[in-house]
Image (tube, helix red, strand yellow):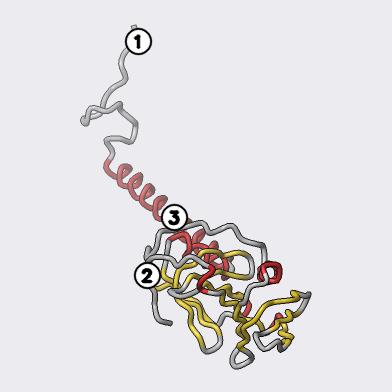
Amino acid sequence: MTPEPPKSEHGNEHSWWSDHPDLIGVARRGRREFEEEAAEAERDTEQLRRRRRRIVDLCFEWMSRGDLVGVGIGGRTFSGRLVAAVNDYVSLDTETSRVVINLNSVRFARSERVGAFPGTTGERSVSSFRAELGRHEIEARPVRLLGAGDGFDVTGVIVVSATDHVVVVDSRRVEWLLPLEKLCCVVLDPDRERRPDGPFDSG
């Protein structure tokens, strides 16, 4: 018959160090240091992830949380709910319209309220701001195009979406050539998009 291993005064199986107070203290300190190092490594990993994010990545996180987002373009600020965040652009539903924003033209973006809206992974979208312009050319509906600063504010139909510019014809049949590098955003006809529910800033 195999004898049972000796037990410590606490009723556990006896280890050579279990009743030695100095060694128990060393073990506890070692465990605490290990946990602290693991927590620090986790913080470092999270910080590295944040450093590697692009603007669109952070916008996607805000959209997923359902944040109330403000985006500054030129002298304007659009506030509302992000519904798409893809590569070089985001789409934002404000109280009155949908705004498709070229991220290369953003002065700032802010998240003001966590969970102001239901979180979403975004609507089905095209892959780039230029592709979005091409979609509006095909739809041939009036849109408002805003340039950087006081560059331009043109409302009309996009008749050509080219490599480095768009051509827009306004209601007076005036033809506008707008360079893509100066184009900040496209404001869509408010009647063509469903108005979202929830709080908004006036911007």
Indicate the position of residue 199 as horizontal and vertical percent values.
Answer: 36, 71
Q: Hey, what amino acid is under mark 1?
A: Thr
Q: State the quadrant of the N terminus.
A: top left
Q: Hey, what amino acid is under mark 2?
A: Arg
| Gap in angstroms between the C-alphas marked 2 and 3 | 33 Å
Secondary structure of the residue carrying tag 2 is strand
| Gap in angstroms between the C-alphas marked 3 and 1 | 42 Å
Q: Earlier in the sequence, mark 3 or mark 1?
A: 1
Residue tagged 1? 2
- Local packing at callout 2 (Cα closer than 10 Å; few below 14, some 14-19, many 20+) is some
- Local packing at callout 3 (Cα closer than 10 Å; few below 14, some 14-19, many 20+) is few
135 sits to left or right of 117: right
Indicate the position of residue 162 as horizontal and vertical percent values.
Answer: 77, 75
Residue tagged 2? 113
The residue that appears at 39% across and 63% down in the rendered structure is 117
**Residue 127 picture quarter:** bottom right
Q: Hey, what amino acid is under mark 3?
A: Glu
Residue tagged 3? 37
Check the image and report above or below for 2 versus 116: above
The residue that appears at 57% across and 70% down in the rendered structure is 55
Of 178 and 51, nearer the camera is 178
**Residue 144 picture quarter:** bottom right
**Residue 198 picture quarter:** bottom left
Q: Earlier in the sequence, mark 1 or mark 2?
A: 1
The residue that appears at 64% across and 91% down in the rendered structure is 151
On residue 15, which mark appears?
none
| Gap in angstroms between the C-alphas marked 1 and 2 | 67 Å
Indicate the position of residue 158 as horizontal and vertical percent values.
Answer: 69, 77
Check the image and report above or below for 159 versus 114: below
Indicate the position of residue 74 as horizontal and vertical percent values.
Answer: 56, 87
Residue at the limit of the structure toward the bottom, as seen here:
150
Q: State the quadrant of the C terminus.
A: bottom left
